[in-house]
Image (cartoon, rainbow, N blue to C red):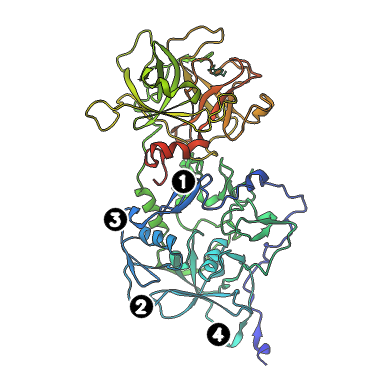
Amino acid sequence: MKLAHLILLLLDLHLSSSGHTPASGLPQEDLVEQKCLLQKYTHLSCDKVFCQPWQKCIDGTCVCKLPYQCPKNGTPVCATDGRNYPTYCHQKSFECLHPEIKFSNNGTCTDQGKFNVSLIYGSTDTEGIVQVKLVDQNEKMFICKNSWSVAEANVACFDLGFPLGVRDTQARFNIPVNLHINTTECLHVRCRGIETTLAECTFTRRRTKTPHGLAGVVCYTQDADFPTSQSFQCVNGKRIPQEKACNGINDCGDQSDELCCTGCRGKAFICKSGVCIPNQYRCNGEVDCITGEDESNCKEDRQHNIHEGVARPDQGGETEMETEETEMLTPGMDTERKRIKSLLPKLSCGVKRNTHTRRKRVVGGQPAEVGDYPWQVAIKDGQRITCGGIYIGGCWILTAAHCVRRSKLHHYQIWTALLDWLKPNSELAIQAVNRIIIHENYNGATYQNDIALIEMKKRPGKKECELSRSVPACVPWSPYLFQPNDTCIISGWGREKDNQRVYSLRWGEVNLIGNCSQFYPGRYYEKEMQCAGTSDGSIDACKGDSGGPLVCNDINNVTYIWGIVSWGENCGKPEFPGVYTRVANYFDWISYHVGRSLVSQHNV
Ligand code: 4AZ
């Protein structure tokens, strides 16, 4: 009887901690933000994450680029259709449009045979010990258990046709003892977790004296479900144990368990945007948080994480003391992915040309100097400066809808690089207006959608608007770039608290305020508006500042136009903060009118 010849090969040295019960008896802290879950964010939601270099962000979703939009230089790769592609980006872009065609190998197609993954010794075809056959090897090989985590197991399951990824990475399977499998030689594999086939991952061969555990997997299928209670519902329909949400590990396979977090469990890092990323992504030379803080303050750790072989989060710190020989078999495509990313065009916005040290002075503000606010413009209506505006690039100015009327187009002038309108400085330039676009849902009674675009006239014979002293502020593409309590800056020529006229540009620091309905019940629309002010009301926008900027600086000191001065009850009263048009909510409206290439920072 065959059974008699079976032994239970202990693939796992220690008991797996992948159970359903919390590790400690303490009640589980709920780190998931329920309201955010309604948005159904996944790895394709560019409000929360960066798109792949072969994708672009359109209306909050990463969509496939066309292959011709890939950077030209690179080396050819071979795909499962037996065809050569000029670069990895071309192949991934083609695969994005035709998912059945996957990556096969780096370099041109040869007749050496195909890459292959299979499962054996499982009782169904959804599970078993993982075997791979590399393109240039004849034999099938096993994978060492200590290199096997959720990232690699998900990729293996995707590759095998299970789109929901892995159910269990620690499963044990019975290997017939008479097979005499050599478990001192197995492959190490390292994936990022976003690959569609293990062929894209890094394989190394390690020979040791002591036998290895071999990697096994149970792929997720709907019929093998977790109980509905006490489980987290992923956007792709998968259920995972509640305690695996917000741990930095992509247990869902579509990352939906890591995108709505108020904090992270275990060895994970929380991005300001509410995303948990694995700790080893911190200071690894690639920005993962859309807000960039995973790559800041890195001096010491940088060298550390940039190297291979940092302990993985779900491995319990196993080390391989007894490695005798390590041989690189396939280098993996992650380095190539990063290289392609670095070749994508970069938008120049939000960075001042000359940053001189600012002498420190809107209500309670301070006077600005030339070059301090190079995106600030003044809108002159006849003889008076009536509103502010913000330069966003090309010939385009962003302002408040309540500042402009289409019928008065010929009365307006745009004054750029202006400081004091009683004593105009030499840098001042004056532009006529070509077109005014007012938001189609602007409501003059409620101030909803208080946003408008002004297109300036080009000088005769010129193809572009040449504003040598102006710098565009960046348009925020995600509502998660800045948060309540962040400190931002307002500027303008508006009135002082006592209604005193102001002739020179003034600026002041304000904090973003959450929960603003408490100050303006029934009048505040969270999605479209943003409150900002100071606790004592000492800094505020006022009459005449309308249409002007509320700007915030990201961790790299890049300036974003977060708000447009819109309305508020009085000026300088702490119980009535200033209300601004929430510009991030209008990214698609703006890019529709001015063109994506002018405002898209990430993947035009
Ligand atoms: C205005 O009348 C105005 N304190 C602008 C901003 C604020 C109040 C009034 C906010 O243009």
Mark 3 to mark 2 CA distance (whole Å): 26 Å
Dot 1: within a 10 Å radius of its alpha carbon, few (fewer than 14), some, or many (20 or more) residues? some
Tag of residue 180? 4
Horizontal and vertical percent position of residue 45: 52, 49
Quadrant of image for the C terminus? top left
Residue found 53% across the figure and 16% down from its top: 542
Mark 4 to mark 2 CA distance (whole Å): 28 Å
Residue found 61% across the figure and 21% down from its top: 577
Residue that label 3 marks = 73
Residue that label 1 marks = 287
Residue 287 in view here: yes
Does residue 397 sit above or below 381 in this rendering?
below
Name which quarter of the figure residue 510 lies in.
top right
Tag of residue 554? none
Does residue 113 sit above or below 232 in this rendering?
below
1 or 4: mark nearer the eye: 1
Q: Hey, what amino acid is under mark 4?
A: His
Residue that label 2 marks = 112
